[in-house]
Amino acid sequence: MLLYVKHVLPETDPPARQIHMGAGCFIELVSIGMSQEGYQTKVAYLPQGDYTLKANEMTEKPVARITFVKTSNKNKDVLYDYIYQRGTNRKPYTGKMITQTEFESIKSLMGNYHSQLQFFTGKEQMRPYLNIFTTAMEIETRTKATNEETRNKFRFSEKELAEKRDGISLPQMGYEGFILKIATKQMNNGDSLTWHSEKTFKATMKGINKGIESSKGLIFFTTKTNTKLDWIKSGRDYARFNIAIAKLGIITHPYNQVIQEYSEMGNLKKKFRVLAKINDGEKTQMIVRVGRAKISYKSWRKDVNDYIME
Ligand SMILES: Cc1cc2nc3c(=O)[nH]c(=O)nc-3n(C[C@H](O)[C@H](O)[C@H](O)COP(=O)(O)O)c2cc1C
């Protein structure tokens, strides 16, 4: 099986780094799933060589060749049973801070991973980072091109979600009940003027800040270099992390704005790198908050046939 990346976000993810991480997530989920069926998953990364982002090159060369080898004994991955429980939860988090012991349990359940994981807990340790995440979100929302890209990926009704089964929506952002109804109305079905207005900016930031301020721990995934291989492998790490925390009853929500590569984020990204002691050449691939919260809306899943080209 050959795996290609297709859906790019040129404004928000100019190097197409995060979509390669998404491909890594896919590979890891396939691998965990196939372990239950009695197959070992073998992956050849970039089997036809590296490629640039130039028109067509990326869609013509595969990210990976995935093959399966039947194993005599069932080597079910320890994470298999929790695949369907995973999901991003963007609600405000409640209760106790995530402890160092819990972080160690997450790592131990993940088993092998490629990135280096940094963990922060407690209000004092997290404070400077939380401020950075708020500013980063403000920059992303105020930058017309990235904000417009988000509008194009936003789904404004349950009907649209059910049809497209992708993107982001108010229920996925943690809105529900009466508040969801009001917010949906205010969105005006994605009208451009409404979306880019000061009123929407303020309402969005209010919701986002509630989430940021309620963080009960932060985890950064950083790689020694920043190659496509690092992107794919740290994507695999993120998928394992996501399922491991589901097993432990912990939830997560990424805040990747500050590490994105568009120019408007440049200065804040430098500040983040200094604070987190990220050396030259290294790259933080993923930033998440962790905690505990009520169950959230589950994202739609695409039909597997939508991924198959021939
Ligand atoms: C590489 C990568 C980066 C992501 N960055 C963000 C982010 O910055 N903010 C966010 O809210 N979700 C982020 N997500 C989460 C996805 O939006 C989410 O996984 C997707 O909508 C599917 O929803 P689910 O996790 O609930 O299944 C990211 C996911 C991946 C794989």
Image (cartoon, helix red, strand yellow):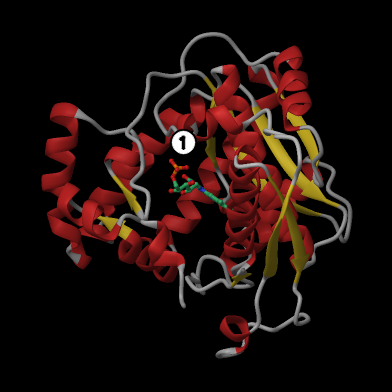
The residue drawn where x is 33% and y is 44% is: 204
The N terminus sits in image quarter: bottom right
Residue 267, position as x, y percentages in the image: 67, 59
Dot 1: element? loop
Q: How many circles with numbers are drawn on the protein?
A: 1
Horizontal side of residue 220 vs 308, given as left or right = right
Horizontal side of residue 188 vs 260, given as left or right = left
Is 268 or 296 nearer to us in this picture?
296
Q: Is residue 74 above or below residue 64?
A: above
The residue drawn where x is 80% and y is 45% is: 115
Is 59 or 127 nearer to us in this picture?
59
Horizontal side of residue 18 vs 299, given as left or right = right
Residue 12, position as x, y percentages in the image: 51, 65
Is 27 or 299 nearer to us in this picture?
27
Residue 252, position as x, y percentages in the image: 54, 31
The residue drawn where x is 25% and y is 59% is: 195
| Residue bearing the label numbered 1 | 87
Residue 57, position as x, y percentages in the image: 62, 88
